[in-house]
Amino acid sequence: MLENYKAITTIAVHDMENAADFYGNVLGLKKIGTNKVALLFDCGGATVGLYESGTAGTGQATCLWWTVDDVAATVKKLKRKGVVFDTNYDLIYTKREGDIYLLDDGMRAAWFRDIDGNILGLGNF
């Protein structure tokens, strides 16, 4: 029923101005619109919407994921912009080298948080 409609990822934030700076300037997403309740960014043709909520950062699962070609290079670039990566996960079938989790089949993944504590991730799959 919904297979022909575009999906939008929405993320709760505490302060729209600070979140706009993080997603726009730190992560490099392009702002494409705003309205009374949301700020919209383009992300590789998909839309990421930010909205203010008291529940920001309370989720315990990844709320946004990027597929990248070179995980190590992307991690390095984000670290230069001040992003701190989560390395406290105890994941089965993986081992960790620095900030990157390695899976047996050559897949790589890394997780970090936005300024509100929302979990974001990236990997080569």
Image (spheres, rainbow, N blue to C red):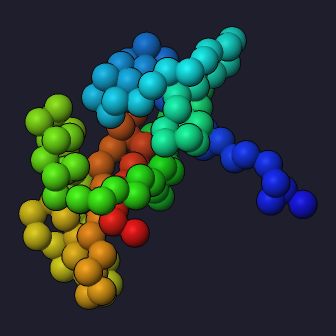
Pick the quarter of the image with the N terminus.
bottom right
Query: Relative to 122, is 17 on the left or the right?
Result: right
Among the 4 quarters of the image, the one containing residue 93: bottom left
Residue 38, image x, y percentages: 63, 22
Query: Does 26 sit above or below residue 44?
Result: above
Residue 16, image x, y percentages: 49, 18
Query: Does 104 sit above or below residue 123?
Result: below
Residue 90 in view (yes/no)? no
Residue 118 in view (yes/no)? yes
Query: Does 5 sit above or below residue 43?
Result: below
Among the 4 quarters of the image, the one containing residue 122: bottom left
Residue 72, image x, y percentages: 16, 58
**Residue ID at (82%, 54%):** 4
**Residue ID at (33%, 66%):** 124
Pick the quarter of the image with the C terminus.
bottom left
**Residue ID at (43%, 20%):** 20
Query: Does 120 sit above or below residue 52?
Result: below
Number of numbered tags placed on the structure image? 0
> Which of these two is toward me, 33 or 36?
33
